[in-house]
């Protein structure tokens, strides 16, 4: 399935108005990526892989309801934790972390929406397909090349993944940690809402 520039720009609204940017000093690739008020009563950590079909379904469906009803209302702070299941997911995570923080979530949404094209289409080169989406999000080719060759970031993501496996016993994606308790699997908004303390 082909995706037009208009389709991707709808998923990455910031790209339509913002120029191509280089990696900014204040957008540390290793900094936490999160949405929601810092003082929200509940913090949810989501452990996800960009090549996980269940993560994509959750991100395109349930998460959108969570964002509207729980995050945007100040009840929940959401922390994104990379848990790549393969080398393609690891590469995508590196690219996502090289975008300015305000473009991170729209880019993740775009990758989930186009997952079949860049992650699973055997006729395409995943790296070049990632580059097309990153370019639409305003990333320069020089920054993209730096992102995919950043061995320090790659090692850091894998170290964090191992630490999360050890600490929270993460063994599948998507997984969530809420108040220290781990939950796993794609679920409906109604099922997820029950996990959030009142």
Image (cartoon, rainbow, N blue to C red):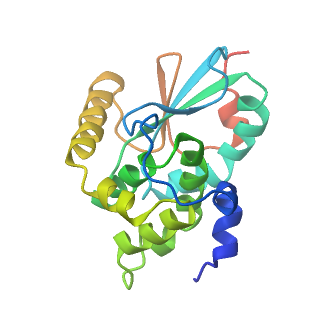
In the drawing, does residue 85 fall left or right of residue 131? Answer: left
Report the front residue among 145 and 155: 145
Residue occupying the point 50% across, 66% down: 135
Q: Percent position (x, y) of residue 105?
A: 58, 46
Quadrant of the rendered image containing residue 65: top right
Residue placed farthest to the bottom in the image? 123
Q: Percent position (x, y) of residue 134?
A: 49, 63
Q: Percent position (x, y) of residue 159?
A: 24, 34
Residue occupying the point 59% across, 59% down: 19
The C terminus lies in quadrant = top right
Q: Percent position (x, y) of residue 182?
A: 46, 26
Residue occupying the point 34% across, 39% down: 171
In the drawing, does residue 113 fall left or right of residue 130? Answer: right
* Position of 104 relative to 75 (above/below): below
The N terminus lies in quadrant = bottom right
Q: How many marks?
A: 0
* Position of 123 relative to 173 (above/below): below
In the drawing, does residue 184 fall left or right of residue 141? Answer: right
């Amino acid at each position: 399935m082909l995706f037009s520039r208009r389709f991707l720009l709808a998923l990455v609204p910031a790209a339509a108005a913002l120029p191509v940017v280089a990696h900014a000093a204040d957008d540390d690739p290793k900094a936490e990526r999160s949405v929601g008020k810092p003082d929200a009563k509940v913090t949810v950590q989501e452990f996800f892989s960009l090549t996980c079909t269940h993560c994509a379904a959750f991100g395109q469906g349930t998460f959108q309801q969570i964002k509207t009803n729980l995050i945007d209302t100040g009840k929940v702070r959401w922390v994104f934790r990379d848990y790549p299941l393969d080398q393609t997911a690891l590469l995508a995570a590196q690219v996502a972390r090289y975008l300015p923080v305000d473009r991170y979530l729209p880019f993740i949404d775009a990758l989930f929406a186009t997952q079949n094209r860049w992650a699973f289409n055997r006729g395409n080169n995943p790296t070049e397909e990632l580059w097309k989406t990153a370019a639409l999000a305003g990333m320069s080719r020089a920054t993209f090349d730096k992102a995919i060759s950043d061995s320090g970031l790659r090692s850091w993501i894998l170290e964090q993944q191992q630490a999360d496996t050890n600490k929270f016993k993460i063994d599948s994606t998507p997984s969530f940690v809420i108040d220290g308790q781990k939950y796993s699997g794609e679920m409906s908004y109604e099922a997820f809402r029950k996990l959030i303390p009142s």
